[in-house]
Image (cartoon, rainbow, N blue to C red):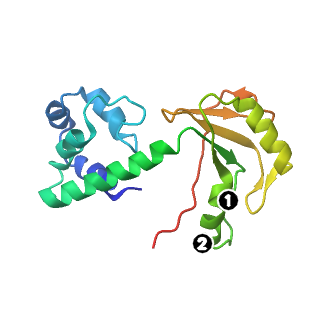
């Protein structure tokens, strides 16, 4: 989780959201929705305010110094742009639960659970081919149960192992990372 996201979320709990929304020029309802999005609605395009301007407004409620604010905003923007460049992609869900596997090994194999695709690709066909190629399992992660497709706006659609889109709200996507 981005430290800027965490700092903003923690500090805004102590502030009146009506005041924050007024300063940002947004309704309180939209601001609440934006604050529940890790990238503050910039990727999903629900946030109409320019990213740096919006983040500076939120940071003005944190008590951080101007230089620190600017540095954290630039780091956040780089992280967000890096994430945007990974879209669209498919996440392979195995329902994996960590028991005793070392975190560094999980982080090393994390890329086997995600693969980038082109927006025009036939998602169902890609999923069927992947499932066939892997024989329905991923080394270390286990048996494939379903696939999560993230479009270029990071909206998520769920597909079964036969490549059929299914309706569900049960989306639990995990990620193994290791930061040094």
Residue at x 74% of width, y 63% of height = 140
Residue at x 80% of width, y 36% of height = 128
* Circle 1 residues within 10 Å: few <14, some 14–19, many ≥20: few
Residue 97 visible, this orientation: yes
In x, y percent, where is residue 60?
14, 48
Q: Earlier in the sequence, mark 1 or mark 2?
A: 1
In x, y percent, where is residue 161?
79, 38
Image quarter for residue 19?
Answer: top left
Residue at x 24% of width, y 26% of height = 27
Image quarter for residue 142?
Answer: bottom right
Q: Which mark is residue 74?
A: none
Residue 160 visible, this orientation: no
Residue at x 65% of width, y 70% of height = 105
Residue carrying label 2 = 104
In x, y percent, where is residue 158?
66, 34
Tell me if residue 1 comes above or below residue 20 in the rendering: below
Q: Quadrant of the N terminus?
A: bottom left
- Choose between 40 and 81: the one closer to the eye: 81
- Tag nearer the camera, 1 or 2: 2
Q: Is residue 5 left or right of residue 87?
A: left
Secondary structure of residue under mark 2: helix
Secondary structure of residue under mark 1: loop
Q: Which mark is residue 97?
A: 1
Tell me if residue 133 comes above or below residue 50 in the rendering: below
Q: Quadrant of the C terminus?
A: bottom left
Q: Are marks 1 and 2 in contact (CB under 8 Å)?
A: no
* Circle 2 residues within 10 Å: few <14, some 14–19, many ≥20: few
Tell me if residue 109 comes above or below residue 154 in the rendering: below
Query: Marks 1 and 2, how far apart in space?
Result: 15 Å
Q: Is residue 1 left or right of residue 74?
A: right
């Amino acid at each position: 989780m981005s430290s800027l996201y965490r700092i903003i979320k923690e500090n805004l709990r102590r502030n009146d959201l009506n005041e924050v929304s007024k300063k940002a020029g947004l309704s309180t309802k939209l601001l609440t929705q934006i604050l529940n999005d890790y990238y503050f609605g910039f990727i999903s395009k629900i946030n109409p305010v320019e990213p740096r301007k919006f983040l500076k407004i939120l940071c003005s409620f944190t008590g951080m110094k101007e230089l620190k604010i600017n540095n954290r905003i630039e780091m956040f923007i780089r992280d967000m742009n890096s994430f945007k460049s990974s879209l669209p992609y498919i996440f392979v869900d195995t329902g994996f639960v960590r028991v005793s596997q070392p975190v560094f090994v999980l982080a090393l194999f994390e890329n086997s659970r995600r693969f980038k695709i082109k927006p025009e690709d036939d998602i169902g066909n890609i999923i069927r081919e992947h499932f066939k190629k892997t024989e329905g399992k991923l080394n270390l992660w286990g048996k494939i149960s379903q696939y999560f497709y993230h479009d270029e706006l990071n909206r998520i659609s769920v597909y079964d192992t036969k490549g059929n889109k299914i309706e569900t709200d049960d989306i639990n996507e995990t990620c193994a990372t290791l930061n040094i």
